[in-house]
Amino acid sequence: MNTSAIASDAPGAGHPAPAGTDAPWTAPTVTRRQVSYATWVCFFAWVFAVYDFILFGTLLPQLGEHFQWSAEQQARLNTWVTLGTVIVAFGIGPIADRLGRRKGIIIAVAGAALCSGLTALAGWVIGLSAGLGFVLLIVVRSLAGLGYAEQSINATYLSELFSLVYTDPASLRRRGFIYSLVQGGWPVGAVLTAVLVALLYPLGERWFGQGGGWALSFVFAMFPALVIAVLGRRLVETPQFLTARRVADLRRAGREAEAMRLAQEPMAPAHSRSSTPACRPCSGAPRCGPRCRWPWAFS
């Protein structure tokens, strides 16, 4: 496949031309800098998704005490929320396949942030109408499963990017380790939950009275996730998804032979598109010159 570089860090760089044009189509390339940025965004997105997910289970006894729910009511609430989370998690895959991995991450993180704030609102509705508020809380916490489902998009997104950039022998050995660091967002998020609940819960109770502790914890969870969603706008879309979308556009335009040819052509890794050797310690940059400190590292 012709995957000549489009040297830009802009998220929309290299998007395919409309299917009806005669201009040659090339998939965009991705740089190590873009992949490193994407890795950090995915890590923090997972950290705060886990924070919100674990926060509900951590504060459920406090919610039950505040609203005088029995243990049976709390168990029923958690069961319905878990079922709703499963449904949302299954639904996020088709969204990422249709809109793209980048947009899927933004939707998942922004949706989880919104649901964190709405959880506090649901508590206020429960104070007005117990039955309606109970149902609203189930719906909100089920939709908060967007954050939990974000990890499945992370896996697809980073796997596609890593397959194009981390292709030299040294990087191939580190692929699993780098992804394990992203997965490490789960224990980091769990610890963050414990620390922030210990700090925010007593503050909320003191500032806003009874029930203010759990409400403040959920409202606070909204803001870091919103920041991650904004940072996600600078993510690049994967060339694999853009190629698949181009193939679909060609088929809708009736250019079946061209679509078939494009679909069957292998996608070249990023480092193979340049004739200049790359220096691995210098993050894949072209040969530094005769004074490079890493002469052994050229691929």
Image: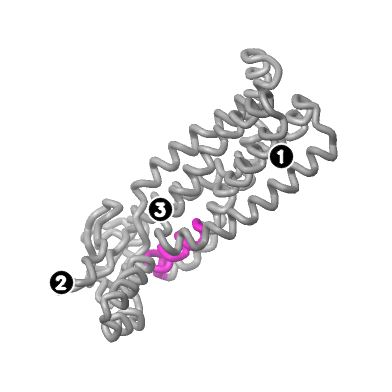
Residues shaded magenta:
153-168
Q: Amino acid at mark 2?
A: Ala
Q: Which mark is residue 103?
A: 3
> Residue at position x 62%, y 13% from top?
207
Q: Earlier in the sequence, mark 1 or mark 3?
A: 1
- The answer to which of 103 and 34 lies nearer the viewer is 103
Location of mark 1 (residue): 57
- The answer to which of 34 and 146 lies nearer the viewer is 146
Q: Is residue 285 visible?
A: yes
> Residue at position x 42%, y 62% from top?
98
Q: Are marks 1 and 3 in contact (CB under 8 Å)?
A: no
Q: Amino acid at mark 1?
A: Gly
User: Quadrant of residue 199 in the image?
Assistant: top right
**Quadrant that contains the N terminus:** bottom left
**Quadrant that contains the C terminus:** bottom left
3D distance between C-alphas at marks 1 and 2: 54 Å
User: In this rendering, is residue 51 above or below 7?
Assistant: above
Element marked by disc 1: helix
Q: Which mark is residue 23?
A: 2
> Residue at position x 75%, y 24% from top?
66
Secondary structure predominantly adopted by residues drawn in magenta: helix
Q: Amino acid at mark 3?
A: Lys
Residue farthest toward the bottom in the current orientation of the protein: 257
- The answer to which of 52 and 20 lies nearer the viewer is 20
Residue 265 falls left or right of residue 153 = left
Q: Are marks 2 and 3 in contact (CB under 8 Å)?
A: no
